[in-house]
Image (cartoon, rainbow, N blue to C red):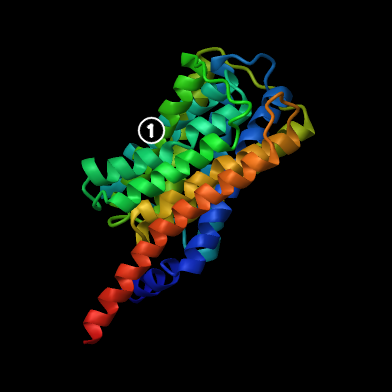
Amino acid sequence: MKENTKGSVFFTNPIVLTAIALLCCALWGSATPFIKIGYGLLLPEKDVPSTILFAGIRFFFAGLLTIIIFSIARKKLLVPKKENLGRVGIVCIFQTVLQYIFFYVGLANTSGVKGTILTGSSTFFAIIISSLIFRQEKLTAKKIVACVLGLGGIVAINLNGLNLSMNFLGDGFAIFSAISLAISSVLIKKFSAHEDPVTISGYQFVAGGAFMVALGLILGGKIKLGSFGGIMVLVYLSFLSAIAYSLWGILLKYNPVSKVTVFSFTTPVFGVLLTLLLLNEDSKVSIVNIIIALLLVSLGIFILNYSKAKRSDAATETVKE
């Protein structure tokens, strides 16, 4: 009980919430260019089975890293309770298997910039699913405004170079990935009442990664691990997943889904900036577009979090009275 109280006070602190959420989003934003780099270093052919194999190896080791790092930090081995194995499996299906099969295949068939724009819509889906399907919170006008501003920022980040035509394997799969991520965020919030979110994250990665490795190999996927640079890319991608998803799960445990996932609108901003820095792609984003995107996304985050903080303060004053 004391641990939960301390965690609630610490992880609901606006400064802590903002810092950790932005760190997670920066790490996820860096995944897009590094995945594209990994395609060139690790895949003999950029086919669907090989991309699934690539993703599977990444997440299998991400799960092991999560379990090892947090077991050492907490001085005890992280093991899910037997009654929660089904919950771990359900999260595994949406957060790792479906999300990343769609994401890796989609990213292999669209540009890095466009991929970040489409997957950035996961925040909108998460708030809708949390409010209308799982009834974890109310869908308010301010949440809708925050979503509109965030989506506006995602579009603004590359309005000049965005190709509005869509292809199913590329753009369609990127959208399906966003929906899967949204569902997994809501499920983690729900299941964290029964199991430690870090434990859920670690074991669902191991299970999902193993499944994707097996699927990729059965379908004839190939990967070349002779390159030191390629191995370093895999290590980095595994590390960022282990850290970002574990911290994100902890934030979801102690905060409303909307208050956490609204920060996901910054992921495409980080992703586009890092893509432009690290990849030689034709997409052009002007500094004006980046500033507009940052302003819109920041305003959306402020509106949602300020309204929540205001209500919390009012509630505190009522209790004091």
Residue 165 lies, with reference to residue 192, above or below; the image says above
Q: Amino acid at mark 1?
A: Ile
Question: How far across and down, in percent of the image, does residue 151 sit?
Answer: 46, 39
- Looking at the rendered structure, the number of numbered marks drawn on it comes to 1
Residue that label 1 marks: 179
Q: Is residue 68 left or right of residue 80?
A: right
Q: Is residue 70 left or right of residue 273?
A: left
Q: Is residue 213 left or right of residue 12?
A: right
- What residue is drawn where x is 52% and y is 26%? 213
Can see residue 30? Answer: no
SS class, disc 1: helix
Can see residue 84? Answer: yes
Question: How far across and down, in percent of the image, does residue 3 sit?
Answer: 38, 73
- What residue is drawn where x is 41% and y is 61%? 305
Q: Is residue 58 left or right of residue 209?
A: right
Dot 1 crowding, Cα within 10 Å, few <14, some 14–19, many 20+: many
- What residue is drawn where x is 62% and y is 28%? 160
Question: How far across and down, in percent of the image, does residue 177 sit?
Answer: 44, 30
Question: How far across and down, in percent of the image, does residue 223 sit?
Answer: 65, 21
Q: Quadrant of residue 114?
A: top right
The residue nearer to you, when weighing 265 against 47, is: 265
Q: Quadrant of the C terminus?
A: bottom left
